[in-house]
Image (cartoon, rainbow, N blue to C red):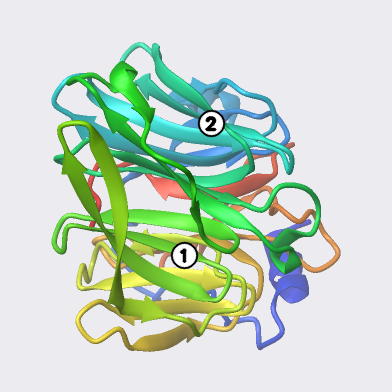
Amino acid sequence: MDRRSLLKGALAVPAAGLLTAAPAHAAAPPAFDVLIGDVNSGKIFLFDRNKPFTDRNIKWQLNPVGSGHPMEHRFRDTNGDGQILVAVTGTPDSGTASIYRRRDKKLLWSANVPNYPHAIERARGTGVVVVAGRSKGPGGGAAKGGSLHVFRPTGRHSGSLIRAGSPIPFHQAHGLLWDPQLERMWAAGGSVLTAYRIVTTAGSARLVEDTARRLTDFHRAHDLQPDHQRPGRLLVTDTNGVYAVDKSTMRRTTLHTRRLVKSYVRHVSGEQMWTGAVPDGNAFGTKYVHFNVSGVSRARQGAVIYKARIATTAYL
């Protein structure tokens, strides 16, 4: 399927929809690396966004522990282990959260997640790790259930993480993002976007909801990412579109009405990167990563790309 066919089959609005054509005299596309998770191979790959996503251009790759699909993959900085990759893999029945040292891919920590994990995030400062899992079993966004799983460090290294209390119920938990400006852990799933304070003692860690930052206007909220160009807002996808949420007012604005967007982020340059499924296609996505401003789509042949992440350790 070529790019035109993909857009024609994916959009219920004119072809411009989510994709924005490049200006006639556009500057060179911004340079940054992209992490993708391939559902078909089960692997995570790092590519230069300005080169074809072929085997010869793979800059880094990992086959994460645990069976199932690679659902999340982010680089983060730590004091004890240097730069790490946090990842989750899973199936509708169970999953695995894991952390790797980037430079040598050494597995530093892993834990079973008893539902279907879709996101993982590490809070800077406390080192607390949170995993978001949707309900166990079939049913997708229509099913009940879902939870947040909290892990706290007992030392300065990632390998010291242990479970902190019982899972916190959260309907169809799908997205997480640590916010160092507000010192909040944002979470999205079902109809809800909300934020949590992380309260720690010498022997505990728990999430306390900041109810003033709760929105309930989404339909099966899916991805949760920063706007690196405008760090005062969050980017959220759900079944029906892509939205910006102003963190100071909690006002939601619709950016795009393209359905089934699986991941969406804005680079500091203004470039928009997204992945998505198409009606009657694979529920996880396609072989494409789309870049709106430059009007480019990169295909990884043989892949089904669920999420694409900018390869940065920056939270916002």
Q: Is residue 175 left or right of residue 206?
A: right
- Residue at 50% over, 85% down: 217
How crowded is the residue under tag 2: few (<14 C-alpha within 10 Å), some, or many (20+)?
many
Tell me what residue is drawn at x 74 percent, y 63 percent.
Answer: 143
Q: Secondary structure at mark 2?
A: strand
**Residue 55: x and y, percent?**
58, 25
Residue at the spot of label 1: 188
Image quadrant for the C terminus?
bottom left
Any mark on residue 118, and which?
A: none
x, y (%) of residue 111?
50, 25
Task: Kindly identify which residue carries mark 2.
Answer: 44
How far across and how far down the image is residue 75, in percent? 33, 36
* Residue 242 image point, x, y percent: 50, 76
Q: Is residue 157 left or right of residue 265?
A: left
Q: Residue at x 57, y 20 (%)?
A: 65
Q: What separation in Å lies between label 2 and label 1 (alpha carbons)?
A: 23 Å
Residue 52, compared with residue 257, is above or below; it is: above
> Split into 4 quadrants, where in the image is the N terminus?
bottom right
Please tell me in which quadrant of the rendered image residue 240 appears: bottom right
**Mark 1 surroundings within 10 Å by alpha-carbon count, few (fewer than 14), some (14 through 19), many (20 or more):** many
Assign a secondary structure to mark 1.
strand
Q: What residue lies at 49% left-to-right and 46% top-to-bottom?
A: 167
Q: In the figure, 154 relative to 180: above or below?
A: above
Badge 2 or badge 1: first in the primary sequence:
2
Q: Amino acid at mark 2?
A: Ile
Q: Nearer the viewer, residue 3 or 244?
A: 244
Amino acid beneath label 1 = Ala
How many marks are shown on the rendered structure?
Answer: 2
Tell me if I can see residue 49 in this picture.
no
Direction from residue 69 to residue 97 in the image, left or right: left
